[in-house]
Each structure stands twice: as C-alpha cells, then as structure tokens.
Image (tube, rainbow, N blue to C red):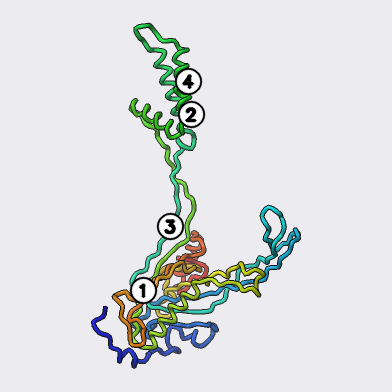
Amino acid sequence: MPASIDQTSYQSSQSNINALQGPLASLYRNNNKLDTILQYPSDLGSPTKNHYVKFWVKQIIPQNATVTTTTTNESVKSGTIAQPGTGQTLGIFNIQPQQTKPVACISLYMPDTLNATYNASYDELSLTNELGKNLGNLQAISNFLGGAGKNKNSASGVASDASVNYGTSKVLGNIASVAGADAQGISDINLQGGGFTVNPQLQVLYRGIGFRQFQLSFLFTPASHDEALTVNKIIAAFKYHFAPDLLTASQSDNGMFFIPPSYFSVEFMINNQENVYLPKYGDCVLADIDVNYAPNGFAAHTDGAPVQTQLNLVFKEIEIVTKGKLQAGYNIATSDGSSGSIGGLR
C-alpha cells in the first residue's frame, strides 16, 4: 500500500493530453465515427511513451435476427432448424457472411511483458499396438510352449504333442478370455524372461495447430481525476465488449439466440505506426478478464477511485496461422519498410 496519497494533486491536476496531436488524432477528428475512443496514460504518444498497444473493437452485426417458425417440412436454401426425430422444420434462418463494424479504439501503454506463443498438436502412435501387439505376442507364446512340449523329457517319458498342444490351447484360451491388458502383461513377462521386449515402433503424427493465445497486463495508477475516470471507462469498455448480447423477444420468436461478443484487433505501435518487429495477430476474442482493484493493498482517493488497478486480458486468435499468412506478414514488413502487413501475421 502506498505510504501516502496526495489527494490534493489527485483532485486538482489536469490532463495534459492534446487530442489533436496525440496518437489518436485521426480518430478524434471523427474520420472513423467510433462510439468510444480512450487512451491511458494521458501523455501516450509523447517522446517518452512512443510505444503503445492499440485495441480496435469490432462489434458483430446480426444479419437476420428474426426466425420464422413453421411446421412444414419444406427445404430452404438459407437453412433450417429441424426438430430431432420428426423432420419438421422449427425455424428458417438466413446464412450470410458475418459482418462487423468498428465501434471503439482503446490505446494503452506497452506492457512490461510481451510473449507470443505458437502451439502445434502432435501425437505418438505405436505401430506395434495399432497392428496387434497382443496377437503377435500370443503367437510367440504358442510357438514357445509348443516347442518346449516337443522336447520335454520326464521320468515317464516324452510328452505327446497332442497333450502339449491341448494344454497350450487351454492356456491361450484362458489368456484370451481375460482383458487385453492382462493378456499383454503375461506376454511381456514371457518375453522379458527370455531377454526380449517388444519394440513399440513409435511414430510422431501431426494433428493440427491450435489458435494462438496471449495475455497482456496493465497497471493503472491515475495521476488525475480525469485519468481515474478514463481508467474506469477503459475497464468498463473491455467488460462490455467481452459479454454477448441476447436477442429480445421482438427480434426473435423465442429469444433463444445470442449475439456473440465483439472481436478485437490488437496492434503494437511505435511513433504512431505499427511496429513490424513485434507480433501481428488476426482478429481475436477476449477470452478472459481479470481486474484487481488492490494489487498492492487497497487504497482509494476521497471519491472512492482506487489508487491502483491491475487489468489482465487474455486474447485468443480466431484464425489459424499458416505459412502463407506468416510469409505475407514478413515479406511486406521487410521488402519496403512498410509499417503494416495487410493480410499477414507474425
């Protein structure tokens, strides 16, 4: 907890942002007609704070919110909602390309840590198991016991092949009637006693690539009353666009549909241009929000605004990273020094 809180300076200090000269100057000129334009701290874009993160928020526009109910079984090209087991159509809906519109831009200082993780899924496959390890080992036991019976000597003489084969069949039958794992264990013990073990013949199989996920953390320590209000608006904006919306009864016959949460486009900026040396992500969803209003022990100003607030945001990309998308990002960034890489990822 801070040793002291200068309430006077907090209440009286003024924001030093010049909206028409800062990193959001073009936005303040209303060229993009955004609903929300926010930044923290107030001097973002100055020579000492020329690195920052820009979050573009894009809201999903429902193309056809009304679902027409019907009890017919007619087929429509746009799509149907069928009742399971009856074949009757419960509703008709239009399938159109998803559309979004930019509604907000939030610019924050560059966080202390910035990690980009690329994950792929690989599985180990044992050819021995897949092709029938149990069957092969049972056959080995059969051959072993059969050979031992043919050469078995005892006080009463040589055992007959018929009796040995019958005993072998009974043993293998009992093994086969047990669960596969038990039969496999007996086979492995038998081989181990002879100084052998089965080669699992492992292979690595590529199963696919997952969506990239990354986390950004910000610590807000507002220096003025205006900045405290801005921090509160920033946190509220992230919460709002994190949540879905529910179609009202007037928009949908039964109110069973959600409008998904907004998409986010994250850009890492330097001197009001995109930093081509840092990761470039496609559209993302905000998967997790964690707000800590007392990161160093609770302390508040006279109006109740926390002295410090920590915001952790976890984003997940909604498009798969491919060689082509990566190549496009790096080619544009390195060929002509462009500050952007349209269509490319990094």
- SS of the residue under disc 4: helix
Q: Which mark is residue 292?
A: 1
Residue shown at the point (44%, 39%) measured from the top left: 126
Q: Earlier in the sequence, mark 1 or mark 3?
A: 3
Say if mark 4 contacts mark 2, CB within 8 Å. Answer: no
Q: Earlier in the sequence, mark 4 or mark 2?
A: 4
Seen in the picture, residue 168 relative to 281 is either above or below; the reply is above
Q: Earlier in the sequence, mark 1 or mark 4?
A: 4
Say if mark 1 contacts mark 4, CB within 8 Å. Answer: no
Image quarter hosting the N terminus: bottom left
**Where, by quadrant of the figure, is residue 39 drawn?**
bottom left
Residue shown at the point (37%, 75%) measured from the top left: 110
How far apart in space, not on screen, are marks 1 and 2 (Cα)? Answer: 60 Å
Q: Amino acid at mark 2?
A: Ser
How far apart in space, not on screen, are marks 1 and 4 (Cα)? Answer: 70 Å
How far apart in space, not on screen, are marks 1 and 3 (Cα)? Answer: 29 Å
Q: Give the camera-side residue of 111 and 49.
A: 111
Residue at numbered disc 4: 169
Q: Amino acid at mark 3?
A: Asn
Q: Give the camera-side residue of 59 and 80.
A: 80
Q: Amino acid at mark 1?
A: Asn
Say if mark 3 contacts mark 4, CB within 8 Å. Answer: no
Residue at numbered disc 2: 177
Residue shown at the point (41%, 15%) measured from the top left: 149
Q: Is residue 265 visible?
A: yes
Q: Earlier in the sequence, mark 1 or mark 2?
A: 2
Q: Residue furthest top?
A: 156
Q: Give the camera-side residue of 116 and 34.
A: 34
Q: Amino acid at mark 4?
A: Ser
- SS of the residue under disc 2: helix
Residue at numbered disc 3: 119
Residue 327 x %, y %: 48, 63
